[in-house]
Amino acid sequence: MRTYKIAAMGGDGIGPEVVDAGVEALRVCAERDGGFALDFENFDWGSDYYRKHGVMMPAGGAELLRGCDAILFGAVGAPDIPDHITLWGLRLEICQGLDQYANVRPTRILPGITSPLRHVSGPELDWVIVRENSEGEYAGVGGRVHRGMASEVATDVSMMTRHGVERIMRFAFALARSRPRKLLTVVTKSNAQRHAMVMWDEIAVETAREFPDVTWDKMLVDAMTMRMVMKPQSIDTIVATNLHADILSDLAAALAGSIGIAPTANLNPERTAPSMFEPIHGSAFDIAGKGIANPVGTFWTGVMLLDHLGEKPAAARLMRAIERVTADPALHTPDLGGRATTKEVTAAVCEALRRAND
Ligand code: GGG
């Protein structure tokens, strides 16, 4: 029997609560499947670690994760530490250090969940956003001089490389090809950003030639926000830069009912290092410790993790268990308008997994 080593890293705020729930559900998944085992190793990196050691994780921390098969991550961010310290010191350090350049964010309206788009007729909302996850606005290029003086200067340079854009375009076209509608929207802002975004568009045209069976179009990011609300059925797969996709995927999650249910995978598609799976939501300090965080985003993240490991039947079984639970409004957490607790939702998903006869 294959045993997968999984790094479990709750991080900050509600992160540890939802990762504990995710670990519980994944353990039941493995038991129920019987064909594989999961060996979790806990990593206490994050803001508490920072308060003790002055860093979010030990030096070379990303390298310590290379030995595992996947990483289950919670959230990062704390009210008393600047966000750029927590984000760059943990999540981005891991994503960039392990070359997890393709961030994949599926959006679907799960059974029992009411979308603000309920007025829209046509096919169900079923999107996948591909976020470039290694460069662009998050390249970390820039600087700040003459602090506090009238002459102070600060820059953040969005840096794109041909290598980086080609690989994410190819990934997105291939993903679009694998989906029934074979439809891709390339999000851009090349009207205003006349260097890197123009190269981005040109590489989209070049890549499209390799995928003649994929129908694609190009959309300015501002217009894309309107299209997501007004014509959601015209969209299937989306590829966008690091920052654009970060913003669009929060909108997508809200349109699907709550950011509490949205999952994401930070993939190293060539598998030269482990990939990292996390709910899209952040640390949500306002509800941390209250036991009401929605674990569904982490469970769906677990589906992506199992899928990536090649455990397809277990992934599908977990997804069906999640859908059985979301279908029952009595099992909705407060972000979905309900009163259920994290523990109740987790117990219900575990019970649905144990009862599954498929
Ligand atoms: N689980 C996702 C998370 O913790 N996100 C924190 C955050 O601030 N992310 C910003 C970003 O990734 O751009």
Image (cartoon, rainbow, N blue to C red):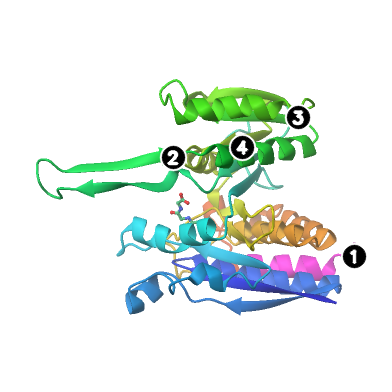
Mark sitting earlier along the chain (4/2): 2
Q: Could you tell me how far apart the alpha carbons at marks 2 and 3 are, in whole angstroms?
A: 26 Å
Q: Amino acid at mark 2?
A: Met
Q: Could you tell me how far apart the alpha carbons at marks 1 and 3 are, in whole angstroms?
A: 40 Å
Question: Is disc 4 placed on a helix, strand or loop?
Answer: helix
Q: Could you tell me how far apart the alpha carbons at marks 4 and 3 are, in whole angstroms?
A: 13 Å
- Residue placed most toward the observer, 270 or 277: 270
Residue, x 60% and y 50% (percent of image)? 262
> Circle 3 is placed at which residue position?
211
> Circle 2 is placed at which residue position?
159
Question: Is disc 2 placed on a helix, strand or loop?
Answer: strand
> Circle 4 is placed at which residue position?
166
For the residues labelled 4 and 3, say whether their Cβ atoms are less than 8 Å apart: no
Q: Quadrant of residue 46?
A: bottom left
Q: Residue furthest left?
A: 150
Lateral position of residue 170 relative to residue 153, left or right: right
Residue 192 visible: yes
Queried whether the magenta region covers residue 350, the answer comes back as yes
Q: Which mark is residue 357?
A: 1
Residue 23 location (% of width, % of height): 65, 72
Mark sitting earlier along the chain (1/4): 4
Range of the magenta residues?
345-358
Q: Amino acid at mark 3?
A: Phe
Mark sitting earlier along the chain (4/3): 4
Residue 188 visible: no
Q: The C terminus appears in which quarter of the rendering?
A: bottom right
Mark sitting earlier along the chain (2/3): 2
Residue, x 64% and y 55% (percent of image)? 268
Lateral position of residue 10 relative to residue 53, left or right: right
